[in-house]
Image (spheres, rainbow, N blue to C red):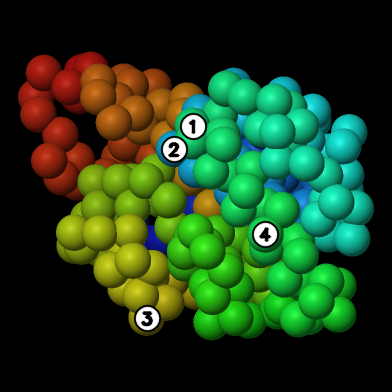
Amino acid sequence: MTGSIDKIINTLIDAKQPQSEFVRLMDSFKDPYLVLIACILSLRTNDRTTYPATLRMLKLAKTPEKMMNVSEDDLAMAIYPVGFYKNKAGQIIELSRLIVEKYDGKVPDSIDELCKFRGVGRKTANLVMTLGFGVPAICVDVHVHRIFNRLGYVKTKTPEETEFALREKLPVKYWIPVNSLLVTHGQNVCKPINPKCEICPIKKFCDRINVKDSQKGI
């Protein structure tokens, strides 16, 4: 990687790439419960599908106390066609009940506790910490994992490995904004296949690891 991480992050900030409606919605949430259930919907589902599904879900309930009393069929119907919508409906109602009964209606503010909920992994837990609680944590999804490896900033094989590698070297001041910033860059420019290197604002810093010549767009 050529150049400092500060230059890369600040260049992406200055680029002001268009965010998806779902990313903007998630960034607007300050309630850890809303971040949690919206993130669950987003798993293995694109933002175009997740965004309207989230809005439909929130018309049914916005608190764990109300959500635990929604029927699984009604919730499943509201969030369709997100991936695994029936399983996610059951999962959201179950964790809502646990939050009320075990955590006094409050989402736990620790990654370890969050990961005890069925179907909640480190990606979701970290996002709840950053967007819901405003606590520095590193949410690594496929975009963050791909882009940091393409840059040559880390050399990892899985998103979880990337998270822990970034915890060692990424300045803490970037932990909260880095997910939405790189998700947006990944959706607009640094795509999994045929990345748009010719218009990439950070191409001069990038080692283009595992990007074939035919993919580089230059």
Crowd around label 1: few <14 · some 14–19 · many ≥20 (10 Å): some
Q: Earlier in the sequence, mark 1 or mark 3?
A: 1
Q: What residue sits right under mark 4 in the picture?
A: 94
Disc 4 is placed on an element classified as helix
Q: Amino acid at mark 4?
A: Glu
Q: What residue sits right under mark 3 in the picture?
A: 168
Crowd around label 2: few <14 · some 14–19 · many ≥20 (10 Å): few
In the rendered image, which quarter contains the C terminus? Answer: top left
Q: Residue at x 42, y 77 (%)?
A: 167
* Mark drawn on residue 83: 1
Q: Residue at x 86, y 80 (%)?
A: 104
Q: Amino acid at mark 3?
A: Glu
Q: Quick one: 152 or 144, which is closer to the camera?
A: 144
Measure the C-alpha gap from mark 1 to mark 4.
Answer: 18 Å
Q: Position of residue 55 (x, y in %)?
A: 79, 30
Q: Amino acid at mark 2?
A: Arg
Contact between labelled residues 2 and 1, with CB atoms less than 8 Å apart = yes
Q: Earlier in the sequence, mark 1 or mark 2?
A: 2
Measure the C-alpha gap from mark 3 to mark 4.
Answer: 35 Å
